Structures are given as C-alpha cells and as structure tokens.
Amino acid sequence: MTRPARIFTLAATYISTIAAANWAVATYGAIPIGLGLLAPAGVLFAGLAFTLRDLLHEAAGWAWTVAAIFAGTALSVAIAGPGLALAAGAAFLVSELADLAVYTPLRRRRWLLAVAASNAVGLVVDSALFLWLAFGSLAFLPGQIVGKTYMTVAAVIVLATIRARRRTVVA
C-alpha cells in the first residue's frame, strides 16, 4: 500500500471508529463489560480508537490525528447528537495530548511498549473526561477502563503478531 493510501485508510478508519463509539452509546446506552461492570456501549470502539490514533500519528503525524479527531466529532454530531459528540471530541483531543506525552518519547525505542503505555494513559484521561462531560458522573469509570483495556490488549497482541510475521518473512 502506498503511503498516501495508508494514511487515508488509517484516517478513515479512525474517524469511523470515533463515530461508531458515539453511535453505540446513543443507540445502546450502558452494556455489561464483564466483572460485574457496566460501561457506555461505545467503550469497545473507543478502546480500538486509541491504537488507531497511534498508527495514524506514526504514519502521518500529529496534525493529521487532530484533524481526524475533529472530523470524527463532526460526523458524530450527525450520528449521535451534539452532546455525546462534543464530549467525546473533547475527551479524544485531551487524551491525545496525554497520549503524545507518553507515546512520543517511547516510540523509537520500543514501539509496542509506546502503544500499550500511551493507550493506558489515554484511556484513563479519555474515560474520566468523557464521562464527566457526557453524563456529569464517573460512575462508569471502572467499566470504561476495563473495556478499553480489553481492546488495548487485543490490539497490542494483533500488532505484535503482525510485526513478528513481517520479521519472519523478511528473514
């Protein structure tokens, strides 16, 4: 895949994931996440979005990532309404800054560690801010953290597998 095609694909997927997270919350409300916890239904899409954000940042840079957050927020307004969309957009934007603070210094040395660590920080910041802005409560915070952690672990496993296979093919 060419670099422009990869950037476009990552940006479109990231934007779609943001919109899907907001659609799921507006459509399904809270869902069981395991361990007796509930979380807004968009938690799994949002958890995936953190890894997509790192991949887009790696491929195209910070400006593309911020532009995608704004595009995902705009699409979400049409899909889920302004209340959820603006809360999610603000949370994604602030968590992107936290993500950058962790991801950027680690990415050259240990890329998978950078993805995992930045996702861990980003998901806590995003969860707390989103819940507070959207619902005025942190009642779902444990479920948000667990649900997004599920997705981070799954994404890191998939990325590690892809990287290992690429090394095997090259070697």
Image (cartoon, rainbow, N blue to C red):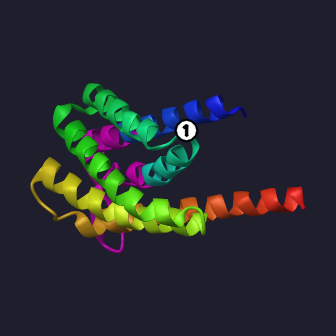
Front-most of 147 and 106?
106
Front-most of 109 and 93?
109
Q: How many circles with numbers are drawn on the protein?
A: 1
Please name the residue shown 79% across and 56% down the image.
Answer: 166
The outermost residue toward the right is 171
What x and y, as percent, mark residue 64? 45, 36
Q: Is residue 46 above or below residue 10?
A: below
User: In the image, which residues are magenta?
Assistant: 20-47
Q: Quadrant of residue 160?
A: bottom right
The outermost residue toward the left is 136
Can residue 66 be seen in this snapshot?
yes
What x and y, as percent, mark residue 131? 19, 55
What x and y, as percent, mark residue 77? 25, 29
Can residue 33 be seen in this snapshot?
no
The outermost residue toward the bottom is 35
Q: Is residue 155 above or below residue 19?
A: below
What residue does disc 1 label?
Answer: 10
Q: Amino acid at mark 1?
A: Leu
- Please state if 21 lies on the left or on the right of 113 as rendered: left
Q: Quadrant of residue 31?
A: bottom left
Q: Residues within 10 Å of mark 1 (few under 14, many from 20)?
A: many
- Please state if 119 lies on the left or on the right of 22 as rendered: right
Please name the residue shown 37% across and 39% down the image.
Answer: 66
Please name the residue shown 42% across and 38% down the image.
Answer: 63
- Which quarter of the rendering shows the C terminus? bottom right
**Does the magenta portion include 33?**
yes
Q: Secondary structure at mark 1?
A: helix
Please name the residue shown 41% across and 35% down the image.
Answer: 68
What x and y, as percent, mark residue 162? 71, 57
